[in-house]
Amino acid sequence: MASDFKLPDIRPPITFNPHKHHFGFLKQQIETWKNLSWPEVEKELLLIGTNLIDLYCGKLSVEEICRQCLHFSEKEGLTSAGKLKNWLGQKEFRKIKLSDNSEWVIKQGLEPARFLHIHPAKYSPFTIRVRGATLKTVVALKVLTGKEMQNQLKLKLVNQVRSEKLGLSPIKTLEKGKGISLIWTLFNSP
């Protein structure tokens, strides 16, 4: 990873990927990534993946989300992978509510030391569903285009970034209020 890159303090036993699931984190990282070489940025963008994901857009920081989830797990006695497994029972995951009423999924993590895997719940308050490729496209555009494309998306430039920088297929249109246009508007809001 880039030497300037600093992941928020996510203490064990929590597993949380803010690249995929935290809008505020991504917005801050874009400013850092503007000063790095593209290969360094590209490595981090891989952490977003390509699947459909839930992106938290609320006011809680990464640290605060982790703190509240850790507090919940301690209160419930979820202090080991085994205790979490018992708490989950036959379910793959369970939901909890944080202080801003956003809902978060808790499921079994893959690493023994980070057994508490969290991410925003589908259709939770302050959360939007987005394709990983769409999110990567918008983030790459924000990093690479600077003032070139302040408010108005240009299909030619979008497809150039998708194909040349991200290895993604070009798109046919930019539908206002959907997909890339929607996420672009989100990233351009104050």
Image (spheres, grey):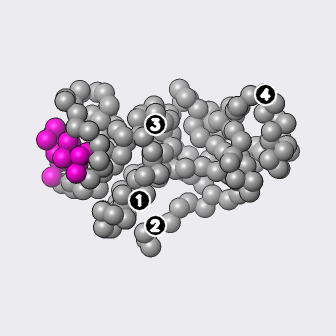
| Mark-to-mark CA distance, 3 and 2 | 22 Å
Q: Amino acid at mark 3?
A: Asn
Q: Any mark on residue 51, and which?
A: 3
**Magenta segment: does it hold 155?**
yes
Q: With 12 as the anchor, is 56 left or right in this view?
A: left
The crowd level at tag 4 (other Cα within 10 Å; few <14, some 14-19, many 20+) is few
Q: Residues within 10 Å of mark 2 (few under 14, many from 20)?
A: few
- Relative to 63, is 170 above or below? above
Say whether marks 4 and 2 touch (CB < 8 Å): no
Mark 2 lies on a secondary structure that is loop
Q: Which mark is residue 90?
A: 4
Q: Quadrant of the C terminus?
A: top left
The quadrant holding residue 82 is top right
Q: Earlier in the sequence, mark 4 or mark 2?
A: 2
The type of residue carrying mark 2 is Met
> Going from the N terminus, do you reach mark 3 or mark 4 first?
3
- Whether label 2 touches label 1, CB < 8 Å: yes
> Which mark is on residue 43?
1
Along the horizontal axis of the image, is 3 left or right of 64?
A: left
Measured Cα–Cα span from mark 3 to mark 4: 25 Å
Q: Residue at x 60, y 54 (%)?
A: 63
The magenta span reads 148-164
